Image (tube, rainbow, N blue to C red):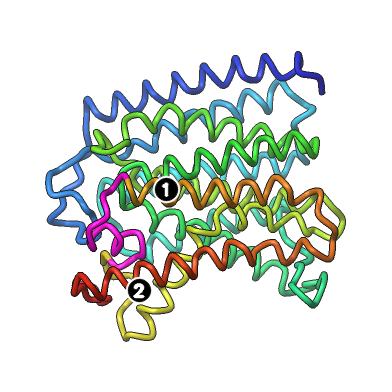
Amino acid sequence: MQLEAFLPHFGFAVLLVLLSAGVVRLMIAYPMLDDPARRAATAHTVPTPRGGGLGIVAAFVVGMVVLYGTARFARIAEPEFIGTILAAIAIAGVALADDLMDFRFIVKLAAQTGAALVAMASGLVLTRLALPWVGVVDLGLWGPLLTLFWIIACTNAVNFMDGMDGLVGGSLLVVCASLCFIGAQQEAWFVYAAALFLSAGLLGFLPYNLHPARIFMGDVGSQFLGFILAVLAVACSRFDTSQLSFLIVPLLLFAHLFDTGFTLIRRVLMGERPSTPHRTHLYQLAQRSGMSVRQVTMVHGGFVLFQAMLALAFPNLDSDVKPLVVLPPLVVQLIWLAYVARRVRHAGLSWRAG
């Protein structure tokens, strides 16, 4: 497509930005308050409206409905397209109810599983996986199980990282903008359009979430974003026959996945229940050890920019090198872990919840 063909899309995206911002302003005017006394994991000390992610959901769903009716060039197979929209609406609806009522984690997990199965039933399933030093492995019956695990893990990774003003909103704006560019580069117009709509929604929300935040994203935003990006990762795997391009989204989200994975494994090994609220993610410990919210957010912004540069270069790498692209961000995260651990020790903080 030529540049002229992109211009109407960006004009429509501006309308979606305004839609998202309008919904967020309504959520501020008629708030669902986040009570710090009920949420041990929050860094705030005063009640703050939450549910601002509803603006992101509105922008995405409206964009997808218009896309379905008007832009056949960006359509994937109809069952997959409809399945993605229905699953997105389902996960957003349950997450919004969770923002209102604080469901138990098992209820959230059941909802995430159900939404993932809807998307998978439409045909969005991994069949191959690229492993460093091994190559491409046909997954066979493991494909659906790995897809289910990936969607649930990504959904929760983004959700768990949403505990600091501007961190998830700002970093995912870079992720979605990068994915939009990669989708256009690969002529994967469904991925391009979906990422564009997510970017528009985030642009409308983010000004109200920068520190000090006037509103929080809430589960309706963070679970929704994690779920959609997980589904888009499976869609990205269609870029090449070996499905190496599945790695693009995990690469863009590497810092989020590392922090969540490390924290989960550490808490299990320390005998803690993973579902209990806590403030022991690496980004939270960094802030508690003396770094400001803006500093921690900027560090994570740097992580995502580095990961985005690798993701943009990914399609041009040799097939043998592509599975190794996760190693540079892994090194960066290990350095960050060592730095945070040093700060935790000097500040006399505990790695345990409470």
- Name the quadrant of the N terminus: top right
Main SS of the magenta part reads: helix
Q: Callout 1: helix, strand or loop?
A: helix
Q: Badge 2 is on which residue?
A: 274
Q: Residue 18: horizontal and vertical position, in percent?
A: 44, 18
Q: Callout 2: helix, strand or loop?
A: loop
Question: Is mark 1 in CB contact (under 8 Å) with mark 2?
Answer: no
- The segment highlighted magenta reads 280-294
The amino acid at mark 1 is: Ser
Above or below, comparing residue 69 to residue 206 in the picture: above
Residue occupying the point 44% across, 21% down: 19
**Quick one: label 1 or label 2, which is nearer the N terminus?**
1
Q: Is residue 338 magenta?
A: no
Q: Is residue 78 left or right of residue 9?
A: right
Q: Is residue 277 left or right of residue 36?
A: right
Exactly how many numbered labels are in the figure?
A: 2
| Crowd around label 1: few <14 · some 14–19 · many ≥20 (10 Å) | many
Q: Residue 260: horizontal and vertical position, in percent?
A: 44, 65
Q: Badge 1 is on which residue?
A: 222
Q: Residue 72: horizontal and vertical position, in percent?
A: 78, 26
Q: Quadrant of residue 50?
A: top left
- Name the quadrant of the C terminus: bottom left
The amino acid at mark 2 is: Pro
Q: Is residue 287 magenta?
A: yes
Q: Is residue 96 left or right of residue 154?
A: left
Q: Is residue 78 left or right of residue 109?
A: right
Q: Residue 304: horizontal and vertical position, in percent?
A: 53, 49
Residue occupying the point 18% across, 49% down: 44
Residue occupying the point 69% across, 67% down: 144
